Image (cartoon, rainbow, N blue to C red):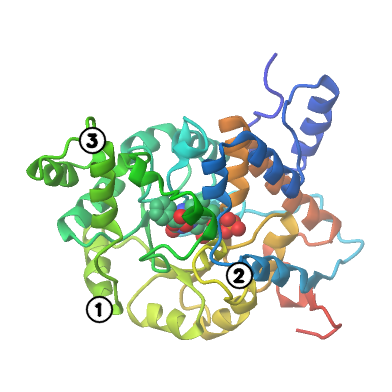
Amino acid sequence: MSDPTSRPARTSPNYDLYQRDIFKAGSYGVLSSFSTDPDKLESLAKEKLSERGWLYASSNAGLSLTHQSNRRSFSSYSILPRMLVPTLTRDISTTLFGHRIPAPICFAPIGVNAIYHPDGELAVAKVAGELGLPYCLSTASSKAVEDVAAANAAGGPKFFQLYLPHNWELAESLLRRAWNSGFDVCIMTVDTDHLAWRHGDLAQANYAFYYGIGNEMGWSDPVFRKYLEEKGIDPKTDPRTAGRAWIDTIWHGKAHSWEDLPRVIRLWKDISGGRPFLLKGIQHPSDALLALDHGCDGIVVSNHAGRQVDGAVGSLEVLPEIVDAVKGRMTVLFDSGIRTGADVFKALALGADAVLVGRLWIYGLSIQGEHGVRHVIKSLLAEFDILMDVAGYKSLKDVDRKALRVSGLTKL
Ligand SMILES: Cc1cc2nc3c(=O)[nH]c(=O)nc-3n(C[C@H](O)[C@H](O)[C@H](O)COP(=O)(O)O)c2cc1C
Ligand SMILES: O=C(O)C(=O)c1ccccc1
């Protein structure tokens, strides 16, 4: 029987068709592990993964206070529905960095996807391409960027997330490979020069690279391979030493500073002929302005899903201040804590141009590989689209701060 959920969403502007697919599929009993509830998806993923896999996906900094603040900040805003608005022809498409996309939703960069499913990044990039949504590949990919591009063959924008190596020759090689593979936006992550204190991972010494898992981006790189050869390290016979070398080259040894930015921006602009360069992990309005001063084309307002600074502010809480500081002079993307269509709506209403989602698709990938990713992302698209319908918002242009109330009945 053909898979009733596999209709490419791009051909149908109304994602609520997916709701009908789900009802029909339900009556035929086609799907196995199935839920559209994010909490249920989280527990299904937990059941499916090994203890280490689950710990890596769920690990937060410290006592998870930032993760909790992320979720709490969504519930401190409420949506003001409008009635009798003819929303049947609503439009949730938008343009991001010159790409027309069917919804303002992107795949956040997540490292080492092979932990969650053997197809890893290939499954995720395939679904993103099919749906026409931007796919962002992590430097910590467990597949080579060239193979990920091939899996994304159906099309859709591709962004490359850069963890800036301490070796400029390697940085150039990674960026060139990404550009040659069709990745035309560079997003440099600045909140994770070092991993934070994550109790879950520390308890198990749970760092995939040290076990030789998920270093494919490095091992497929000519510059890094040459470095390994010079050191006499063979990833095939000694994956752990090779993994440690990869980690030390990308993350350890030295912290980055604003002084590194002009060089990396110039490098990317030279390679790509001036395509966009963003910083990911911005939470302070002053850092947003520094990014602007340094010539960035955008930022991702993000606290890395609460995995870095424990006890930090909820990412949604700082979004309006940052949007006000930036004043439309660069693109503002948002992530950390998005689980529902209502969350997407709130982030857009507070001024984000688009959002990134991370853990939601990890759950899908863990539960049922490619099919699971397709299901969770189509569910999010459908939920957001249906929310626009029932809340009486016809177009993204209508979604602004007037659409929200802060709890306590204060006007924004
Ligand atoms: C398991 C895991 C791995 C991640 N790996 C990366 C990464 O390699 N690069 C990066 O920039 N961000 C990484 N992130 C952060 C995500 O890109 C994103 O900021 C975050 O997951 C968004 O929050 P959400 O998961 O609540 O949607 C990771 C997050 C998780 C949960
Ligand atoms: O774990 C993370 O949050 C992350 O960004 C990362 C860092 C190194 C390797 C893989 C993922």
| Disc 1 from disc 3: Cα separation | 36 Å
Mark number, residue 23 = none
The image position of residue 326, as x and y in percent, is: 50, 81
Q: Secondary structure at mark 2?
A: helix
Looking at this rendering, what residue extends furthest in the right direction? Answer: 84
Looking at this rendering, what residue extends furthest in the top direction? Answer: 1
Q: Secondary structure at mark 1?
A: helix
Task: Name the front one of labels 2 and 1.
Answer: 2
Going by the numbered disc 3, the residue's amino acid type is Asp
Using the image as rendered, state which of residue 35 and residue 125 is in the foreground: 35
The image position of residue 130, as x and y in percent, is: 54, 36
Image point (46%, 41%), residue name: 113
Q: Which residue is mark 1?
A: 259
Using the image as rendered, state which of residue 391 and residue 46 is in the foreground: 46
Q: Which residue is mark 2?
A: 66
Going by the numbered disc 2, the residue's amino acid type is Thr
Mark 3 residue CB less than 8 A from any atom of ligand 2: no
- What crowding class fits label 3: few (fewer than 14 Cα within 10 Å), some (14-19), or many (20 or more)? few
The image quadrant that residue 253 belongs to is bottom left
Of the numbered discs 1 and 3, the one sitting upstream in the chain is: 3
Of the numbered discs 2 and 3, the one sitting upstream in the chain is: 2
Of the numbered discs 2 and 1, the one sitting upstream in the chain is: 2
Mark number, residue 238 = 3
